[in-house]
Image (tube, rainbow, N blue to C red):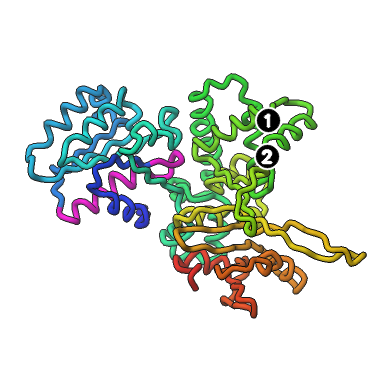
Amino acid sequence: MIFNRQLYVNQLVEHKNNQMIKVITGIRRCGKSYLLFNLFFDYLVQSGVTEDHIICIRLDNRLDAEYRNPDTCLSYIISRIQDKQSQYYLLIDEVQKMDEFEDVLNTCLQIPNLDCYVSGSNSKLLSSDIITEFRDRGDEIRLQPLSFSEYWEAFPDKSWDQAWSEYSTYGGLPHTLQLTTENSKINYLKELFRKTYFRDIIDRYHINQTAPLGRLLDILCSNVGSLTNPKKLEDTFRSSGNIRLTDVTIRQYIDYFKDAFLLSEVERYDVKGKHYISTPLKYYLTDMGLRNARLNFRQIEETHLMENVIYNELIYRGYSVDIGVVDVYEKDENNKQIRKQTEIDFVVNQGSQRYYIQSAYDIPNQEKETQEIRPLKNIHDNFKKIVIVKADILLRRNEDGIVTMSLKQFLTDPNSLSL
């Protein structure tokens, strides 16, 4: 099965020959090797690069095991560069399997006609902090699981309802989509979480007591899109009575999950005051299939899943995303003015662009609509305000300029926010 990940191929092309190391990062099994050795390799060949000018090293392959030695690898790379006047491309997968790989790559940067691309995983390369190894000499290309549009492109015969149901349940990890039965998908995702993601974190940080780590992950998966903080989570553990965790340890564990690309942490932004609010925060899972597998597919609440998928889509499109806070002043039953704090699901920024977005699974009546658009109406700037609903409706715009669009249109039209 072929997945056309053109957005990421374009990113690699944009960074081509920029005298930096291109480091492809992302959650395990999201397709980093496929992007590098299939899609980008094919692009290079189709653009006129001959295959003898593309140096491919797969360090997880036994046939390339000798190149796990840094000196042997470097000697091999140099031996392949026969023409000093032509451009060569170096593609290394599972680079963490090589000792002192930072030195090898930094040496490769000094070869003027060599352009370097690497990917990796496992406990050595779980997080984006690999970029710090190269400081100003590395470019990170963060790869996400398949977006909904990438998923549906591979299954064009599925109806929207069927595609959404499967995607929001089993997620967008490429191998999951190639499995044909529910049981095979469920077993794959559960085993992947247990044997790969969780094991990577335990090995990297030498964690002996795994039950608290697992319980915290269960809580975060169960409460995607809910406001919380380490202190509140500490209280949750204390009330359960079985496991004790301090807020300091909880903060540390959450950082581990972030470093493993399992989840994202989203800050709150005071729209009128133009400043960040340090706590509480929200957390979203990188892949819905993994989230559901962690919870044994017991909590498939479409409201939360839809909000999480919208967040992931915004990240996929390259936006930075915050949670918006807007103060609203109203009069109480005694005609006294009071201040209420309302929330906007997503404040979305990219360069000079900004969008305010509400995720509303269902708007059955006028009261619900008023509730959803209330914080949007209290933002007095000219940036676009959008409500995304699950129903398959035609895009509409009210007298305040607030746009309501369907989830289908948002996910399938790359220009949906500009409509």
Provide the secondary structure element on which disc 1 rests: helix
Provide the secondary structure element on which disc 2 rests: loop
Rendered location of residue 395, percent (x, y): 57, 76
Q: Nearer the viewer, residue 296 or 238?
A: 238
Rendered location of residue 47, percent (x, y): 18, 56
Rendered image: mark on residue 319:
none
Rendered location of residue 381, percent (x, y): 59, 68
Give, as a single range, the part of the protein colored magenta: 25-48
Instruction: Note whether residue 51 is visible.
Output: yes
Residue of label 1: 247
The answer to whether marks 2 and 1 mark residues whose Cβ atoms lie closer than 8 Å is yes
Type of amino acid under label 1: Asp
96 displayed left or right of 183: left
Question: Is residue 30 covered in magenta?
Answer: yes
Q: Nearer the viewer, residue 12 or 37?
A: 12
Residue of label 2: 229
